Amino acid sequence: MFDDFKAEFIDVEEASVFVRHGGDGPPVLLLHGHPRTSATWHRVAPLLAGRRFTVVCPDLRGYGRSRGPAPTADHAAHAKRAVAKDLAALMRSLGHTRYAVAGHDRGGAVALRLTLDHPGAVSRAAFLDCLPISEHLSRVNARFATQWWHWFFFAQPDVPERVINADPDAWYRGDPRTMGQENYDEWRQATRNPGVVRAMLEDYRAGLTIDARHEEADRAAGVRVSCPALVLWSLRDDLEDLYGDPLRIWRQWAGDVRGHGIDSGHHMAEEAPEDLTASLAGFLAN
């Protein structure tokens, strides 16, 4: 994977971030979702690099091989604000003061926080198969709770760790044929690490508490995404089924929003890399 990309660990204040980066041109930061690592971009990153972009793919704090501080009672150590701070420092250390960001799933929540907290650094933002966490929570009903029950299970203390770590392969079901063998192997190694599992759960615990409060405070203060935004969603997943047109919701957060569905399941970087790359490259180039 990632031929001609450099892989290294970079220390940024509270965290040690594992990152892959390569290419030459305008920088774009790609943020994975749960329970993936930066390897989820192994088909997209080379395509973007081939289109003359510098591509940066980190493991988020606590995921994969990145490490941050121990969990805290208020979950602030794994808040999206803390993760966004990691990434802003990472990009500065790589020499990028202004860049585009694309985040998938939980990485989309981090991309939103990075865009809101560091508006001078982010030139364009793409949100893939996600909404702001507070928008999900404001629409909770029986259907959402049934289909996305894992959000509330992950928020429970201690029990999810015991359940998942008892048989992580059964809990995190992956397919090497779809994911690619090396991506699958890296993902499987990560999900078998109890420390990674704990950090991934803290991501969700932060989402239902401190992250939601941060987003609600932004909405109350009128803080919005000031750069152009692209919203893409998987046509074979449930985001549009649950909420209707995702663009309608995202336009409450940003003034310049465009986007469309991708013919894919949830993990679009693995399942539809050419379509995703074309959409991202077209957005980033204009």
Image: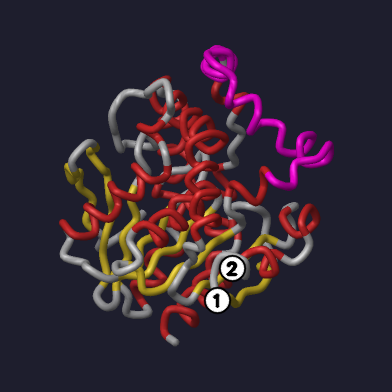
Label 2 secondary element? strand
Judged by its main secondary structure, the magenta piece is helix
Q: Work out whether residue 142 or residue 237 is closer to the camera in this orientation and state it.
A: 142
Please report the residue visible at 62 percent of the width from the left and 24 percent of the height from the top: 170
Please report the residue visible at 29 percent of the width from the left and 49 percent of the height from the top: 85
Residue holding disc 1:
255
Residue holding disc 2:
231
Please report the residue visible at 48 percent of the width from the left and 77 percent of the height from the top: 228
Nearer to us of marks 1 and 2 is: 1
Which corner quadrant of the image does residue 28 belong to? Answer: bottom left
The answer to whether 44 is drawn above or below residue 206 in the figure is: below
Label 1 secondary element? loop
Q: Of the two numbered discs 1 and 2 on the same chain, state the one appearing first in sequence.
A: 2
Residue 78 screen position, x and y as percent: 40, 34
Q: How many marks?
A: 2
Please report the residue visible at 37 percent of the width from the left and 69 percent of the height from the top: 100
Numbered range of the magenta stretch: 138-166
| Quadrant in which the C terminus is drawn | bottom left
Task: State yes or no: residue 155 in magenta.
Answer: yes
Residue type of the residue flagged with mark 2: Val
Q: Work out whether residue 284 or residue 267 is closer to the camera in this orientation and state it.
A: 284
